């Protein structure tokens, strides 16, 4: 795939470039700030953009803002956001435009090369890749009424895997379930969350957003 990287850590940026090139991918550009990212994406049109949330000059949310702008302008371009910490607002904002061709990984996950490359492949293929730790912490962060309280433990586990961006087949492998069992659990989740088949939106995306907003 063709990629652009925006990461202010020189060591991490150069390491990612070397890894991706060795894997046969083409790195179109790699730089340490987000100010030129959107323009470069428009000019070079990569398949996937990898960007850090916190970038110069303020090290707040420059990378996230660039990622959201890219998703709005070029929805066919995949975006993988890297973050040092779990930041709920950033995750929700990134997924607000849909859970396709999007990823949010903690930087520690990048060191697990196979998982990082798998996340890129899933995003490139049109799917999502949400860090398991992000999902886990989002599950336990609230004390108010939980709209997911009606789900069984198994249904909640299946939904958690869905929120990480796994397909039904991958969920089955991960949880040692048959494909029909996965489909049965997901249909039950959709029904309990009152996600209408006829509302014109993907129930998978709506379920993930409901999960993250709960």
Image (tube, rainbow, N blue to C red):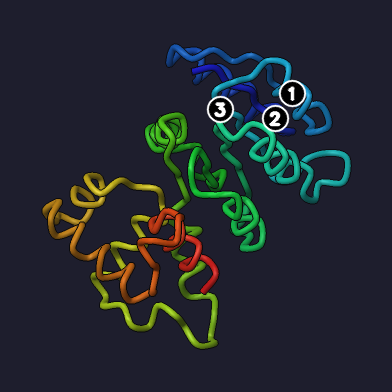
Residue at position x 62%, y 47% in the image: 83
**Location of residue 213 by image quarter:** bottom right
Secondary structure of the residue carrying numbered label 2: strand
Residue 48 numbered mark, or none? 3
In the rendered structure, which disc, 1 or 2, sits on the residue that comes first in sequence?
A: 2
Q: Nearer the viewer, residue 64 or 33?
A: 64
**Location of residue 187 by image quarter:** bottom left
Q: How many marks?
A: 3
Q: Which residue is mark 2?
A: 6
In the rendered image of this protein, does residue 195 appear above or below residue 177?
Answer: below
Residue 131 at x, y percent in the picture: 47, 51
> Of discs 3 and 2, which sits in the foreground?
3
Q: Nearer the viewer, residue 98 or 27?
A: 98
**Pointers 1 and 2 in contact (C-beta within 8 Å):** yes
**Pointers 1 and 3 in contact (C-beta within 8 Å):** no
Secondary structure of the residue carrying numbered label 3: strand
Cα distance between the residues tagged 1 and 3? 15 Å
- Mark 1, Cα crowd under 10 Å, few <14 / some 14-19 / many 20+, is some
- Mark 3, Cα crowd under 10 Å, few <14 / some 14-19 / many 20+, is many
Secondary structure of the residue carrying numbered label 1: strand
In the rendered image of this protein, does residue 78 appear above or below residue 86?
Answer: above
Residue at position x 54%, y 87% in the image: 144
In the rendered structure, which disc, 3 or 2, sits on the residue that comes first in sequence?
A: 2
Q: Is residue 176 left or right of residue 153?
A: left
Residue at position x 34%, y 63% in the image: 159
Residue at position x 60%, y 49% in the image: 97
Q: Which residue is mark 1?
A: 31
Residue 85 at x, y percent in the picture: 62, 55
Residue 198 at x, y percent in the picture: 39, 61
Q: Is residue 165 left or right of residue 182?
A: right
**Location of residue 170 by image quarter:** top left
Cα distance between the residues tagged 3 and 2? 11 Å
């Amino acid at each position: 795939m063709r990629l652009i990287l925006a990461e202010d850590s020189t060591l991490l940026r150069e390491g990612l470039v070397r890894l991706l090139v060795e894997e046969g991918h083409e790195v179109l550009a790699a730089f340490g700030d987000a100010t030129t990212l959107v323009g470069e994406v428009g000019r070079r049109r990569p398949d996937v953009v990898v960007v850090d949330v916190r970038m110069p000059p303020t090290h707040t949310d420059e990378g996230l803002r660039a990622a959201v702008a890219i998703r709005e302008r070029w929805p066919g371009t995949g975006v993988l956001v890297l973050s040092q910490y779990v930041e709920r607002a950033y995750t929700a904002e990134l997924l607000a435009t849909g859970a396709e061709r999007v990823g949010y990984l903690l930087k520690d996950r990048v060191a697990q090369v196979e998982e990082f490359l798998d996340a890129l492949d899933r995003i490139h293929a049109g799917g999502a890749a949400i860090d398991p730790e992000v999902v886990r912490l989002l599950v336990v962060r609230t004390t108010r009424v939980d709209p997911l309280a009606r789900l069984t433990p198994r249904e909640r586990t299946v939904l958690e895997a869905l929120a990480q961006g796994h397909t039904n087949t991958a969920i089955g492998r991960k949880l040692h379930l048959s494909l029909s069992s996965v489909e049965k659990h997901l249909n039950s989740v959709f029904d309990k969350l009152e996600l209408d088949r006829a509302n014109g939106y993907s129930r998978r995306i709506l379920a993930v957003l409901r999960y993250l907003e709960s």
